[in-house]
Amino acid sequence: MDEVTAPPAALADLKARVDTALEQRLAAPLARLTDASEVLLPVAEELEAFTAEGKRIRPALLLLGYQAAGATNLDAVTGPALALELLHTCALMHDDVIDRAATRRSRPTVHVRFADQHRTAGWGGDPNDYGEAMAILIGDLAFVHADEFFLTAEVASEALLAAFRRFTELREEVMVGQTLDLHAATSRTTDRELALTVATLKSGRYSVARPLEIGALLAGAGEALVRGLGAFGDPLGRAFQVRDDLLGVFGDDATTGKSSASDLSEGKRTLLIAEAYARADEGARGLLDRHLGDTELTEAQASQLREIIDACGARAAAEEYVASSIDEARRHLATLDVPDAVRATLDHIAVWIGGRRS
């Protein structure tokens, strides 16, 4: 697989477009919050600060899917693109509560920040309960605003309805994937096929395939192109998630913005972990059983687990899965009837996803 360490310039341009539009369009719903009560000022500030960061991969892919169908007026579908970013905001806030994560994007997670607010104010009740409740509610607000933004698309009503149906399908899949992920970690179910199902539903389709399909549907694309974009996006999305899993264990904290021990302490049953159980000897599996999911996991214990995962060949197997999935996606892309500039950008994104470090 080719080595590309930076995203294509076109993706950076789309990110800048999304950054600007999100700041402008989020102003109105944030103002509604603060107009309702000054108590909601910290809520509005947190939602604004959280959404100010992000790679914007999902909205950018929606815009590329729109262009893949030959459409050029990106302003017409800015609303749906922002809806994907707000849905992602909701998913991250809720995921951090489920995982008891302390940091996100190199800053304290939402539930941690509001728990600290509670402690500083000296309010009644448990600070952690308050922080978690606030993170859930702010995530719910982002979810509601996502629908509001999606429906501002300036496209034919039939195209909007078809795209919104796919948006609903995306949301169902990510919730199902999250549920399976939680069940696997809690029940300590280590299964390769289940890990790949979670990778597909929780992140893969939600991050790549569905955004591309939604963009094409907004442009009124035919079934063949929508299906083709999905065939390209599915393996690319799985590669995206497995790369995330690798970064979650072997990544640099300063680069990824979160602890590289968090996936281990949460006991996530990813493809990487499934490969480790399949390849490690009895003694190493015993150590995995003992320390995976330990909320008091020390850095020394995390390092020991990393050594096991690397030495048994699981890390190499996950890397190979990423590479083969990227190759599969690129083969599908080569068969699609899309503008040359869009094809080149999608191909560059595919290779970049395979080797990304954050």
Image (cartoon, rainbow, N blue to C red):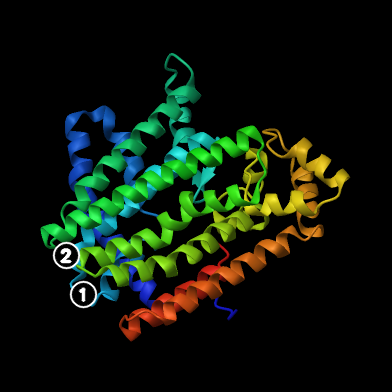
Single out the residue that lies furthest toward the top: 124
Residue 34: which quarter of the image? top left
Question: Which residue type does callout 2 highlight?
Answer: Ala
What residue is rendered at 15% in x and 54% in y? 152
Who is closer to the viewer here, 311 or 19?
311
Q: Is residue 247 left or right of residue 283?
A: left
Q: Quadrant of the N terminus?
A: bottom right
Single out the residue that lies furthest toward the bottom: 340
- Residue at numbered disc 2: 76
The label shown at residue 71 is 1
Single out the residue that lies furthest toward the front: 224
Who is closer to the viewer here, 358 or 227?
227
Who is closer to the viewer here, 57 or 328?
328
What residue is rendered at 46% in x and 25% in y? 120
Are circles 1 and 2 on residues that touch, CB within 8 Å?
yes
Residue 265: which quarter of the image? top right
Q: Is residue 317 visible to us here?
A: yes
Residue 78 to residue 188: above or below? below
Q: Is residue 259 left or right of residue 277?
A: left
Question: Which residue type does callout 1 highlight?
Answer: Ala
Measured in 3D between alpha carbons, the distance from the residue under mark 1 to the one under mark 2, in whole angstroms, is 10 Å
Tell me which label, 1 or 2, sits earlier in the chain.
1
Count of numbered badges drawn on the protein: 2
Q: x and y percent of residue 259 in the render?
A: 61, 48
Q: Secondary structure at mark 2?
A: helix
Residue 124 to residue 78: above or below? above
Q: Is residue 102 visible to us here?
A: no
Residue 187 to residue 260: above or below? above
What residue is rendered at 43% in x and 66% in y? 233
The label shown at residue 195 is none
Q: x and y percent of residue 83 in the render?
A: 28, 52
Q: Secondary structure at mark 1?
A: loop
